[in-house]
Amino acid sequence: MIAAIITAAGASTRMGQPKALLHVRGETFLETVLHGCAASGINRCVVVLGPDMDKILSQIDLSGVSVVQNPSPQTGPIGSIRIALEVLLNHPVEAALVWHVDCPHVSVSTVTMMIDRYRQGDIDIVVPEFDGRRGHPVIFGREVFDELLQGPDGEGARAVVRADPSRVAVVPVADPAVAEDIDTPEAYEELLRRLDSGDTSLPRSEDA
């Protein structure tokens, strides 16, 4: 089983409001990511929240997923990943898809391609790439969970990806969303403009 770790613990200082609660096509970023996971066949999700946990829980029904809090969001995504892995270690999970809430518009087809590549075997990590730029989400096999738990804080998950290129599969995708982070008001406005103009990089309801 492949599980998902959805990181939404940041303070959103540049955005000025919780990114998990921003709306696109009638649902929040966090709901969009959860629906994308479900449409990709991922049924076990761990959502990591931070200082806005109570506000997010009051507005989104997360009863169907595991919710944990990162008490030290300043540690960055690696801190959230470690907290979520502690939840998953005692379950029959073969890999974890780490999906940051600030890139909700990654398409279901991209995630499906990554899962298919992981299940072909012979690798431990799958990274999407658009136009020569690597991005997110990333799949980490159980074989590297200990490295994520014990690696250096400074580089976080990147250190694990870079440690041994032979165990990493880079999957080229026609999805610019993998290389984008929606973490400022300007980036959010640009995303909404693209969607209003007919951009289809965000999964529609029939996809999710």
Image: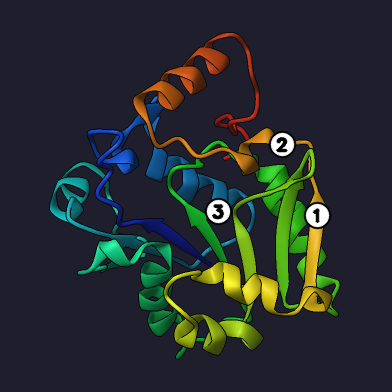
Q: Nearer the viewer, residue 20 or 112?
A: 20
Would you identify the image quadrant in which residue 14 lies?
top left
Seen in the picture, residue 2 relative to 90 is either above or below; the reply is above
Q: Which residue is mark 2?
A: 175
Name the residue rendered at 71%, 71% in the picture: 125
**Whether label 1 touches label 2, CB < 8 Å:** no
| Separation of residues labelled 2 and 3 (CA atoms) | 16 Å
* Position of residue 123 in the picture relative to residue 12 (left or right): right
Q: Nearer the viewer, mark 3 or mark 1?
A: 1
Tell me residue 63's x, y (percent).
29, 59
Q: What kind of residue is marked 1?
A: Val
Q: What kind of residue is marked 3?
A: Cys
Which numbered disc, 3 or 1, marks the residue that appears first in the sequence?
3
Q: Which mark is residue 37?
A: 3
Tell me residue 182's x, y (percent).
45, 35
SS at circle 2: loop
Would you identify the image quadrant in which residue 30 lies?
top left
Other-residue count near label 2 (Cα within 10 Å), few / some / many at <14 / 14–19 / ≥20? many
Q: Which mark is residue 125?
A: none
Q: Which mark is residue 171?
A: 1
Which numbered disc, 2 or 3, marks the residue that appears first in the sequence?
3
Q: Nearer the viewer, residue 93 or 85?
A: 85
